[in-house]
Image (tube, rainbow, N blue to C red):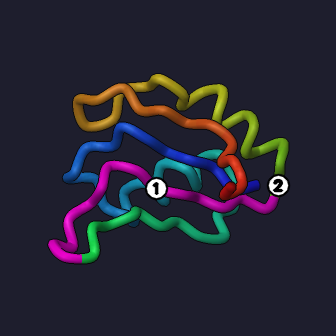
Amino acid sequence: MNIYFGNLSYKVRENDLQSIVEEYGRVDSCKIIKDRDTGRSKGFAFVEMPDNAEALKMIEELHEAELDGRNIIVREARPRA
């Protein structure tokens, strides 16, 4: 399952986010989206998890949880239009 993480602090790094998600199960990839020009985080990321049950449990528990002073948004990623 591909999972969207939004409202992330600009200080959150990929390895930080991956460590949190790995508490719920295996992670195939973790990618924080960055601005092409500045290299700075855009405040959102995508994480892929192979097990849907683990992913759904993680979404349920982390959605609107506080991370680095911000309430994060966690949901199944929608396909690009």
- Type of amino acid under label 1: Ala
Q: Which mark is residue 75?
A: none
Please state which of residues 77 and 81 is positioned toward the viewer in this rendering: 81
Label 2 neighbour load within 10 Å: few <14, some 14-19, many 20+: some
Q: Is residue 35 above or below residue 63?
A: below
- Type of amino acid under label 2: Asp
Between marks 2 and 1 in the image, the one whose residue lies nearer the viewer: 1
For the residues labelled 2 and 1, the Cα–Cα distance comes to: 19 Å
Quadrant in the picture for the C terminus: bottom right
Q: For the magenta stretch, what is the residue range? A: 37-50
In magenta segment, residue 46:
yes
Compared across the picture, whether 30 is left or right of 42 comes to right
Q: Is residue 55 above or below residue 67?
A: below
x 54%, y 28%: residue: 63
Does label 2 or label 1 sit earlier along the sequence? 1
x and y percentages locating residue 33 in the rendered image: 39, 64
Compared across the picture, whether 4 is left or right of 28 comes to left
| Circle 1: element type | strand
Quadrant in the picture for the N terminus: bottom right
x 54%, y 58%: residue: 46
x 36%, y 26%: residue: 71
Q: Which residue lies under the disc numbered 1? A: 45
x and y percentages locating residue 67 in the rendered image: 33, 35
Compared across the picture, whether 2 is left or right of 29 comes to right
Please state which of residues 37 and 17 is positioned toward the viewer in this rendering: 37
Q: Quadrant of residue 8?
A: top left
Compared across the picture, whether 39 is left or right of 28 comes to left
Q: Residue furthest front?
A: 81
Q: Which residue lies under the disc numbered 2? A: 51
